[in-house]
Image: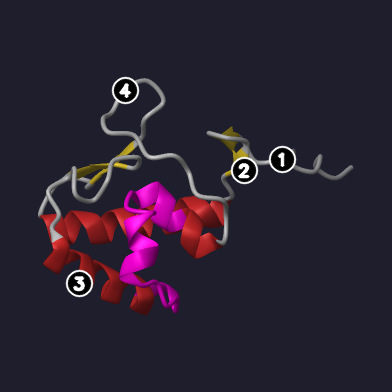
């Protein structure tokens, strides 16, 4: 009389399973974006630059992400993975999610709690 085992994690995008750990990483990366960019909401699929970031902030972002997750992401890693979702996937070792220029159906965002 136990519980049924949980099924596979829901797929997001190109068949990449988003695990609970991946969602937690996304939330932490989104909070770093929000703090550095001084914004209250982050579309998980939008580029750091589309959200108002610039090259000097990229360096601060990488320092914070590397400190938070014990990674060694470089500016060249970031160049191909500049959204919250792509960075989180990189940190978790998942395939990179495609980035979109804008929000729309299927886009996701994280906002600061009020």
Mark with earlier residue (2, 3): 2
Farthest top residue in view = 105
Q: Please, is residue 85 above or below residue 28 in the view?
A: above
Q: What is the distance, in whole Å, between disc 2 and disc 3 at their CAs?
A: 29 Å
Marks 1 and 2 in Cβ contact (< 8 Å): yes
Q: Which of marks 1 and 2 is in front?
A: 2
Which residue lies at the image location 17% right of the left edge and 45% below the top edge? 51
Q: Quadrant of the N terminus?
A: top right
Whether the magenta-drawn stretch holds residue 55 is answered as no
Where does the magenta region start and end? 68-88
Q: To which residue does mark 1 refer?
A: 8
Whether the magenta-drawn stretch holds residue 75 is answered as yes
Q: What colour-coding does the image apply?
A: secondary structure
Rendering coords of residue 30 (x, y %) = 30, 53
Q: To which residue does mark 3 refer?
A: 60
Q: Nearer the viewer, mark 1 or mark 3?
A: 3
Q: To which residue does mark 2 refer?
A: 17
Which residue lies at the image location 13% right of the left edge and 68% below the top edge? 56
Q: What crowding class fits label 3: few (fewer than 14 Cα within 10 Å), some (14-19), or many (20 or more)? A: few
Q: Please, is residue 76 above or below residue 109 in the view?
A: below
Q: Residue 104 carries which label?
A: 4
Q: Which of marks 4 and 1 is in front?
A: 4
């Amino acid at each position: 009389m136990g519980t049924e085992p949980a099924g596979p994690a829901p797929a997001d995008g190109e068949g990449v399973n988003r695990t609970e750990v991946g969602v937690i990483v996304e939330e932490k990366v989104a909070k770093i974006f929000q703090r550095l960019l001084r914004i209250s909401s982050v579309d998980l699929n939008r580029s750091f630059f589309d959200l108002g970031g610039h090259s000097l902030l990229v360096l601060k972002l990488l320092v914070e992400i590397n400190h938070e997750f014990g990674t060694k992401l470089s500016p060249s890693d970031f160049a191909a993975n500049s959204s919250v979702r792509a960075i989180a996937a990189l940190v978790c070792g998942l395939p990179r999610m495609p980035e979109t220029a804008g929000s729309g159906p299927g886009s996701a965002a994280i906002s600061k709690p009020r």
